Structure formats: structure tokens, C-alpha cells
Image (cartoon, rainbow, N blue to C red):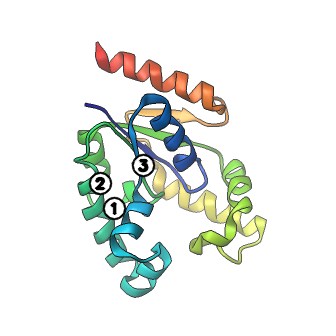
């Protein structure tokens, strides 16, 4: 039974890398945000607008505990998921957590490509965006660094390098 759980800031590549890992390892892939949207028949921004962040985080926790029971999966979590309740401890109990680490400059570049889909950063200039990322990343790092493994996507950044790294993790888990 295998459970890989990807965490990190928005724009770190959790969904892209998670999908590739799942395909390569023959596992099912779940993006927690997509799972929530599918279950509630609403987009995340709608849920945020109707329930507020607190209400959304409650829903997110419940859905995390649902997908956290699935077997032979790769799960990519929202950027804030590890930072609320006991979510990070829960994820570490349920599987192998991997933090996709990147600098604010790299995250900014990734986010500028798809800015319109992210309500927290809409309307920000590139300079405001980088400052926002830097500030919020500082608050989230204590949670992110609780992950069992860290991949620096600026050093290990091709799909092949990441798959190789995760294969090494899998070998360690088997022994």
C-alpha cells in the first residue's frame, strides 16, 4: 500500500508532478482541490465566497481525511492544506509527504502564467505578487518543513529527476 502526498506553495507544480508520478508508479491521482470541487459541485472560489476561509478549511480537512484513506494513490494538496488543524500530522501518519520547495521568484514566474485562476493573487502586480509570496511562504514554512521529504524544484526540476528521486524514496520505504 502506497500513499504519496505532495505539499507546497501554489505554483510549485504539485498537480503536474503528482499526475506524472501517479502515471509512472501506476497509482491513482487525486488533486484535493479538484476532489472538493467534484464532491460539492462548486469551484473553490465559490466555496470560499459562501463559507469564508474558515468554512472552506473545515471542508478541506474532511475531504483530506477521506482521500487520506485511499490506497495506492498520489495526492496533491492545496497550498494552505498543511497549515490548518492537525492536517500536517495527519498526512505524515497516512503516507510519505513530499514538500515541493521553490523560491518566491520561481513561484512568481509559475503563478504569472496562470494568475487568473487564483483568487488570492488576482490583480497583483509582479512586484506585489513576489512580496505576497515571500510573506505567506514565511508563515507556511514551519508546516511545509514537517514533510518527510523535500524536493527543491530548482535543483531537481525535470520530471525524470523527480521520478528518480521518488523511486529512491520508495526503495528506502521498502527496506
Q: Quadrant of residue 84?
A: bottom left
Residue 10, x across and y down, in percent: 56, 57
Position of 168 relative to 127 (above/below): above
Q: Secondary structure at mark 2?
A: helix
Q: Quadrant of residue 159?
A: top right
* Disc with the residue nearer the chain's start (3 vs 1): 1
Distance Cα–Cα, label 3 vs label 1: 12 Å
Residue 147, x across and y down, in percent: 39, 39
* Camera-nearest residue between 150 and 113: 113
* Disc with the residue nearer the chain's start (2 vs 3): 2
Position of the C terminus, as image quadrant, is: top left
Looking at the image, residue 102 sits to the left or right of residue 94; the answer is right
Would you name the residue on which mark 2 appears? 87
The residue shown at (41%, 23%) is: 169
Point out which mark residue 101 bears. Answer: none
The residue shown at (47%, 26%) is: 166
Contact between marks 1 and 2 (CB within 8 A): the answer is yes
Q: Residues within 10 Å of mark 3 (few under 14, many from 20)?
A: few
Position of 144 relative to 137 (above/below): above
Looking at the image, residue 60 sits to the left or right of residue 18; the answer is left
Q: Residues within 10 Å of mark 1 (few under 14, many from 20)?
A: some
Residue 113, x across and y down, in percent: 73, 60
Point out which mark residue 142 bears. Answer: 3
Would you name the residue on which mark 1 appears? 84
- Mark 2 vs mark 3: give the one in front: 2
Residue 94, x across and y down, in percent: 25, 41
Position of the N terminus, as image quadrant, is: top left
The residue shown at (30%, 17%) is: 174
Amino acid at each position: 500500500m502506497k500513499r504519496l502526498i505532495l505539499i507546497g506553495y501554489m505554483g510549485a507544480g504539485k498537480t503536474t508532478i503528482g499526475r506524472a508520478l501517479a502515471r509512472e508508479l501506476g497509482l491513482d491521482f487525486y488533486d484535493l482541490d479538484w476532489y472538493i470541487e467534484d464532491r460539492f459541485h462548486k469551484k473553490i472560489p465559490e466555496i470560499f465566497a459562501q463559507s469564508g476561509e474558515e468554512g472552506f478549511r473545515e471542508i478541506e480537512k474532511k475531504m483530506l481525511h477521506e482521500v487520506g484513506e485511499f490506497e495506492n494513490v498520489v495526492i496533491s494538496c492545496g497550498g494552505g492544506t498543511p497549515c490548518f488543524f492537525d492536517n500536517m500530522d495527519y498526512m505524515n501518519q497516512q503516507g510519505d509527504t513530499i514538500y515541493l520547495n521553490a523560491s518566491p521568484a520561481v513561484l512568481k514566474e509559475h503563478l504569472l502564467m496562470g494568475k487568473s485562476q487564483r483568487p488570492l493573487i488576482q490583480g497583483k502586480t509582479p512586484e506585489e505578487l513576489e512580496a505576497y509570496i515571500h510573506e505567506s511562504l514565511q508563515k507556511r514554512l514551519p508546516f511545509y518543513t514537517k514533510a518527510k521529504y523535500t524536493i527543491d524544484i530548482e535543483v531537481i526540476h525535470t520530471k525524470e529527476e523527480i521520478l528518480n528521486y521518488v523511486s529512491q524514496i520508495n526503495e528506502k520505504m521498502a527496506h
